[in-house]
Image (tube, rainbow, N blue to C red):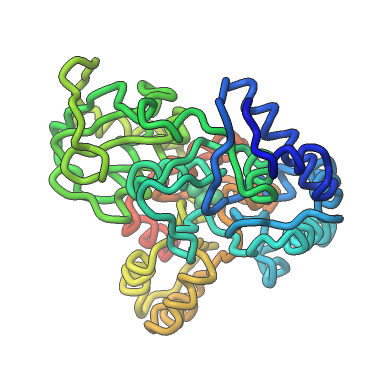
Amino acid sequence: MRLTVDEERMLAGEEGHATQKAMQILVALGKIYDAERLVKVSSVQVSGVSYKNLGDAGLEFLSELAMDGRARVKTTLNPAGMSLTDWKSQGIESGFAEKQLKVIEAYGRLGVEITCTCTPYLAGNEPLFGQHIAWGESSAVAYANSVIGARTNREGGPSALAASLTGRTPLYGLHLMENRRPTLVVDVQTQLRFPEDFSAMGYFIGKVARDGIPYFRGLATAGLEELKSLSAALASSGGVAMFHIKGITPESGIEVSSIESLTFTSRDLGEAAAIFNDEGAPDFVAVGCPHCSLKELATISELLDGEQVKREFWVCCSREVKHQSDEAGYSRVIEKSGAKFALDTCMVVAPVEELGYRIVATNSAKACHYLRNAGLKVRFMPLEQCVVEATRSD
Ligand code: F3S
C-alpha cells in the first residue's frame, strides 16, 4: 500500500506510540482488503463503548492508547452500558459502573466527544454527501452511506479509533463508487405505514441481502424515522451497510435492470412482524433503537400525557435530542408519567438481562434480535402499542 510521507512518519512512530499503533492497524487492514492507499476522513464514530462488550482487555487497550493518542478529526461515541450520571437508578451495580466510567474517561483523554449515541447525525456529527468518514455503528453506517451519501465501511471499534487517531482509513469497499452499486432489487408491493413496518421489512430483507446492497422500489415516502429504522434492521439481520430507495436516497438514480429481484408483499410484512412475538406479558418496555429523534419524543409525550407507567419504561435518546425535548416541553410530560430517559445507553448495550427483566416489548427489530440473543423474550410492536403495554394495569 502506498503511504504519504506523513503516513510513513506515523508508521515509524515519529508521532507517538498510539498513532503508530493506529497506523499499523490501518496498514494491516489495507493489505487484507488490497487498498491502494489511505484516504483522509472528515469524521469518525467509535463503537465498542459498553464495558459489557469491551471487558478488561478492551479497557486496557484504550488506556494504553490514551497515554499519548489524540483524535485528529471530529470523533463521536456510541452508547455506553449505562447512563453516565443516573446509573444507580437504572439498577447498574457499582463494579460495572466503575469500569464503564474508566472506559469513558479513556475516550475523553483521547479527545473523543462523549456523545454516547448511535444517531450521531442527530447530535452534531453530520457528514456531507460524498465525504469519506469512518463510522463504527452498523445502523449509523447504513444511514450515512444510504441517506446522507457519505462513504464509510462498517468499521470495528479498533479500526474506527485508528482512523480517529490518524485522520485516515484504507481506501476500499464503500469508499469506492464501483462498490456502491445495488446487488438486489426489492419491489415493495405493500403499504408501509409506520417506522416499525420499515424495521420489520429491513430485518426480513437483511437476511436475504446479507452483505449486499438492496435497491427498494415502490416506496412513495420515507422520513428520518423510517430510514433510521430501516438502516438498523437491515444491518442487524444481515451485514448490509448501504441501501438505495428509488426516488428517495441520493444515489438511487442508477441502472438496475440486470440484477436479481424479489417482491416484498403484505404477507411478507406480516411474517416479518411475527418473527419476534414470544409468549408472555412484557415486564420491561424500551423504545429508541436507534436513539429517538425529537419527533419520536413528541409522539411519546403525546401518548403519555396524563398517563402513568406501570412497568419499567425506557426512552433511549442522545443528550442532544433530550435537550431539544426539554426545550419543547416533551421531557416534562414523559418524566411525569414515570417513564425514564435512558441517556448515553440503550436496552441492548446496558446489561438488561442482569437487571431481572424477562420479557421486553420494543418497536425495534434490531433490539429484538440482540435481546433474544442475550436470552430475553421479546415482543415486537409499534410505538403506540409499546406505550399501551407500559401503562397497562395488570
Ligand atoms: Fe443504538 Fe443500541 Fe439500537 S446502540 S441502534 S439503540 S442496539
Q: Residue at x 59, y 53 (%)?
A: 78
Residue 339 in view, yes or no = yes
Side of 91 relative to 132 (left or right): right
Q: Nearer the viewer, residue 389 or 40?
A: 40
Q: Position of residue 309 (x, y in %)?
A: 46, 69
Q: Quadrant of residue 134?
A: top right
Residue for point 13% across, 45% down: 220
Report whether 77 appears left or right of 222.
Answer: right
Considering depth in this image, is 336 or 246 the residue closer to the camera?
246
Q: Look at the picture and state if 278 lies above or below 248.
A: above
The image quadrant of residue 251 is: top left
Q: Residue at x 48, y 66 (%)?
A: 124
**Where residue 114 sits in the image (x, y, percent)?**
64, 64
Picture quarter with the C terminus = bottom left
Q: Tell me the quarter of the image containing the N terminus.
A: top right
The image shows residue 249 at horizontal and vertical percentages of: 25, 44
**Picture quarter containing residue 303?**
bottom left
Can residue 273 be seen in the rendering of this structure? no
- Count the labels in the image: 0
341 vs 260, left or right, is right
Return the x and y of residue 175 as percentages of the image width and height: 45, 35
Q: Which residue is at 78% across, 54% downward?
A: 69
| Residue found farthest to the front | 5
